[in-house]
Image: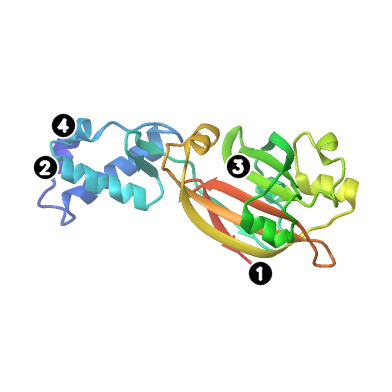
Amino acid sequence: MSRQLMQGSREEFREPRYRQLASILAQEVRSQHSAGDQLPGEVALAKRFDVNRHTVRRALDELVAAGMVTRHQGWGTQVVDRRLDYTVSAGSKVTHNLAEMGLNTETRCLEQGLQRPPEAIAQRFKLADDERLICVDTLRLVDSSPLLRLRHWFDAARVSDWCDRYRGGSTRALLGQHYGLRLTRARVRLEACQADRHDSRLLQCAQLAPLLVLTSDNVDEDQRLVEVSVSRARADRVSYHFDF
């Protein structure tokens, strides 16, 4: 059937073969596949459609550009979830925003305790050499699927007994309920990186997969720095929309 479509309509359609193939594959992804499914390899697709691997590769490039699949060396071609268009504003809260989208969310606490932060963050807090911050690592899941991992750096003096109180869920909720802190973003930085082995394990993505890293300086009502948060999100699942 596919071969007949590709060959028999050669004169009817002016589109290149790779675009015809891309249209067929896109329809199959929408109707037959779910997020996380692996597509057949290039050799198998080339044989099925009686085209060369270069044509298959260009067709898959079209699906990658459309955000339907992702491809990584040694991992193959994988159907991705629809990207979440997440709005970042001065007062936006991750858990609250995802809930407003009608999504079921879960925040797991992976690890927490006093640590010396990277020098760039230590300078932002103006720490002395022997001072530490409370470091809290969390994993956010949407509909039971990992979306992003976060590392929170808190001023230990502002959130005493944090590690005794926090067991998971919204950090912003705990800050408001127990510490009377309503934080807003004063500074945001967005950059790209590749997934390391920890990202691969926690976010269920391939090593070297593209990630979006969002670093936020979060301040209290007096504009004093309380937290620096660093989130690492799968670029195939999240897009950020900035509204300040």
Mark toward the start of the polypeptide (3 vs 4): 4
Q: Amino acid at mark 4?
A: Lys
Asked if 230 appears above or below 241 in the picture, the reply is: above
Left or right: residue 112 versus residue 236 is right
Left or right: residue 54 versus residue 62 is left
Q: Nearer the viewer, mark 3 or mark 4?
A: 3
Mark toward the start of the polypeptide (2 vs 1): 2
> How far is the residue under mark 2 from the one under mark 1?
52 Å
Give the crowd class for mark 3: few <14, some 14-19, many >=20 residues within 10 Å: many
Q: Amino acid at mark 3?
A: Arg
Q: Amino acid at mark 2?
A: Gln
Q: Nearer the viewer, mark 1 or mark 4?
A: 1
Q: Which quarter shows the C terminus?
A: bottom right
Between 222 and 66, the residue placed more toward the observer is 222
Q: Nearer the viewer, mark 4 or mark 2?
A: 4
Circle 4 residue: 47
Mark toward the start of the polypeptide (1 vs 4): 4
> How far is the residue under mark 3 from the one under mark 4?
40 Å
Q: Amino acid at mark 1?
A: Phe
Is disc 4 placed on a helix, strand or loop? helix
Left or right: residue 219 versus residue 82 is right
Circle 1 residue: 244
User: At 47% from the left edge and 51% from the top edge, which residue is drawn?
Assistant: 193
User: At 68% from the left edge and 61% from the top edge, which residue is drawn?
Assistant: 123
Give the crowd class for mark 2: few <14, some 14-19, many >=20 residues within 10 Å: few
> How far is the residue under mark 2 from the one under mark 3?
47 Å
Q: Nearer the viewer, mark 2 or mark 3?
A: 3
Circle 3 residue: 149
Mark toward the start of the polypeptide (2 vs 3): 2
Circle 2 residue: 7
Query: In the image, residue 148 lies at what x, y percent?
Result: 58, 43
